[in-house]
Image (cartoon, rainbow, N blue to C red):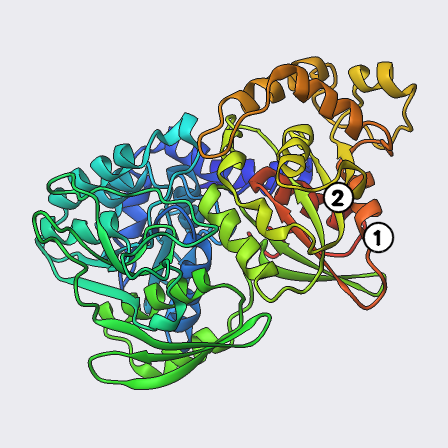
């Protein structure tokens, strides 16, 4: 305990990071059974939340509900969702003698990485496991959707009868886990057919701006037929060959109405309640996150009042709709790290036809996934003609700018600011103005080569030929204003008039960089501030 917490404190003191993982890493090295040892002392046990998108917000919703129900909630709120993060979240609340502080009335709510959930379930023996959804994400790390689904199916078979499953009825792969469960299964889903984006032919044809990650029946391999599709493969489905169909959900959203950009009014039905809940976040995906949290609360026997108050008073999690005021402008941070996630962010931003000021940050660090070819599956075409200003940055800024060009954005309408000084660009445009130094200098030629290679790996959109790619890069280099995320942020803010909102859409490490830059300017606190 002491060694782990000392390592975390040293990490923060040296500004190496929040120290949210090093605590657990050191503790696990010294005592491999530390998670099970500490978790067993929680009076109300543990809940695990996993899935591709929405883990952090769902766990935040559930934590708020449980607090309003009078419980002490311990969670890995910084998003450290590997085992070391779980261990760290417990160790910082432990006494030197190995006992948890204030374990009475305590429950843990941990968001868990999709690939790590089987190990976490074995160690924590949770009361409930929530599967929010399953989409294609970080192919170099997770592989295709079926690889993750296979891992989950094996895990569910091993869960004890005392563990409840909370499943998304509208996600075929996730819902199919219920057939394997030995314990209680609770489904949640949407019933508001006005949200259907299927084609007008009544055959369930995917609507415009949709990428579908799960097409085939998990039993027989036939393509699903949809009577309603809300986004991607989420909807009301049935297999025409074997008859597998969407299970009837226990918790249902009967009607969804958008009051303002980030205020949704949802009529929710449970076996004992029918009422309206205001979700203080934008996007249909947050309706699913709220339903997952409500259903988990039902599994834990929580009453209706804390469910309503917990969701309605929820504050946006780190980078998930977070709001920061800067020089008379509002910055809104909307994390997007895979095709479906980014498509839904674009849908949320542009479905009303209102022009927005936007800063995209595309990185390819390990936590983002090194393969960025997924951007060719994102429907940037939806945003064409709707960006009041557009700035593009990140370690793969050129790849994204090229994708935007093929989506119909004129190069001169974008401000392109790569993360590092590019010698290749200097050869085209002369010496560039220099900002703050960033990591990765000397990678520029490789980045350009990888950008061309990534463009060649397109899946749903046509890849441009290599010579055309080079010509495009030359076009984009004409008005090159510098490099670095700090410069990009300054530029994007400057292009946003006072009183208006700049929407920042980063991948995961881009979000961390944005936060560090805002912290450096004294605009936000350190995200680990207030921790032991």
326 sits to left or right of 396: right
- Looking at the picture, does residue 218 appear above or below residue 131? above
Q: Answer with left or right where residue 409 lies relative to residue 27.
A: right
Please, is residue 337 above or below residue 363 in the view? below
Q: Mark 1 or mark 2: which comes first in sequence? A: 2
Q: Say which quarter of the image contains residue 67.
A: bottom left
Structural distance between the alpha carbons of marks 1 and 2: 9 Å
Outermost residue, front side = 201
Taking the spot 25% from the left edge, 50% from the top edge, the residue there is 174
Name the residue rendered at 52%, 48% in the picture: 342
Q: Are marks 1 and 2 in contact (CB under 8 Å)?
A: yes
Q: Quadrant of the N terminus?
A: top left
Q: Residue 291, percent across and down?
A: 34, 68
Q: Is residue 198 above or below residue 468?
A: below
Category of crowding for the residue at label 1, using alpha-carbon neighbours closer than 10 angstroms: few (below 14), some (14–19), many (at least 20):
some
Q: Secondary structure at mark 2?
A: strand
Indicate left or right for 242 with 354 as reference: left
Asked whether residue 498 appears in the rendered view, the answer is yes
120 or 14, which lies in front? 120
Q: Position of residue 221 (x, y in %)?
A: 16, 38
**Residue 237 position in % (x across, y down):** 22, 57
Residue pointed to by mark 2? 391
Whether residue 69 is visible to the viewer of this picture, yes or no, is: no
Q: Which residue is mark 1?
A: 495
Identify the secondary structure beneath mark 1. loop
Where is residue 86 shown, x and y percent of the image? 39, 45
């Amino acid at each position: 305990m002491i060694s782990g917490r000392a390592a975390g404190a040293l990490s923060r003191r040296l500004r190496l990071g929040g120290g949210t993982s090093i605590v657990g890493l050191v503790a696990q090295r010294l005592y491999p059974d530390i998670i099970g040892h500490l978790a067993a002392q929680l009076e109300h046990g543990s809940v695990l939340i996993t899935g591709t998108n929405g883990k952090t917000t769902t766990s935040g919703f559930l934590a708020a509900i449980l607090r309003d129900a009078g419980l002490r909630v311990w969670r890995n709120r910084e998003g450290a969702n590997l085992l070391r993060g779980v261990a760290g979240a417990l160790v910082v609340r432990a006494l030197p003698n190995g006992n948890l502080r204030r374990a009475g009335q305590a429950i843990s709510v941990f968001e868990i990485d999709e690939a790590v959930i089987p190990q976490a379930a074995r160690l924590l023996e949770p009361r409930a496991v929530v599967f929010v959804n399953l989409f294609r994400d970080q192919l170099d790390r997770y592989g295709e959707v079926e690889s993750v689904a296979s891992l989950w199916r094996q895990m569910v078979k091993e869960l004890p009868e005392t563990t409840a499953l909370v499943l998304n009825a509208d996600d075929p792969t996730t819902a199919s886990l219920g057939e394997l469960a030995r314990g209680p299964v609770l489904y949640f889903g949407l019933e508001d057919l006005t949200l259907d984006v299927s084609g007008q032919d009544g055959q369930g044809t995917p609507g415009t701006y949709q990428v579908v990650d799960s097409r085939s029946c998990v039993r027989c391999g036939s393509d699903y037929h949809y009577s309603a599709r809300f986004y991607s493969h989420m909807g009301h489905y049935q297999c025409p060959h074997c008859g597998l169909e969407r299970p009837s959900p226990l918790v249902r959203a009967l009607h969804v109405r958008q009051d303002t950009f980030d205020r949704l009014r949802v009529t929710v039905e449970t076996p004992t309640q029918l009422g309206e809940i205001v979700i203080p976040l934008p996007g249909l995906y947050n309706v699913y996150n709220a339903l997952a949290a409500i259903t988990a609360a039902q599994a834990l026997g929580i009453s209706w009042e804390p469910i309503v108050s917990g969701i309605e008073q929820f504050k946006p999690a780190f980078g998930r709709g977070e709001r920061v005021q800067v020089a008379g402008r509002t910055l809104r941070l909307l994390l997007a790290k895979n095709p479906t996630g980014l498509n839904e962010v674009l849908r949320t931003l542009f479905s009303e036809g209102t022009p927005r000021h936007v800063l995209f940050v595309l990185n390819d660090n390990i936590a983002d996934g090194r393969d960025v070819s997924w951007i060719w599956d994102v429907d940037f075409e939806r945003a064409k003609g709707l960006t009041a200003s557009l700035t593009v940055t990140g370690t793969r800024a050129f790849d994204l700018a090229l994708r935007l060009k093929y989506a119909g954005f004129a190069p001169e309408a974008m401000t392109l600011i790569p993360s590092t000084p590019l010698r290749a660009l200097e050869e085209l445009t002369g010496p560039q103005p220099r900002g703050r130094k960033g990591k990765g200098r000397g990678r520029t030629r490789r980045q350009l080569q990888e950008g061309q290679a990534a463009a060649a790996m397109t899946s749903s959109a046509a890849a441009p030929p290599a010579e055309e790619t080079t010509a495009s890069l030359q076009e984009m280099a004409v008005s090159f204003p510098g490099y670095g995320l700090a410069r990009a942020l300054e530029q994007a803010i400057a292009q946003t008039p006072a009183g208006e909102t700049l929407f920042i859409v980063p991948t995961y490490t881009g979000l961390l960089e944005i936060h560090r830059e805002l912290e450096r300017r004294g605009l936000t606190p350190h995200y680990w501030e207030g921790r032991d």
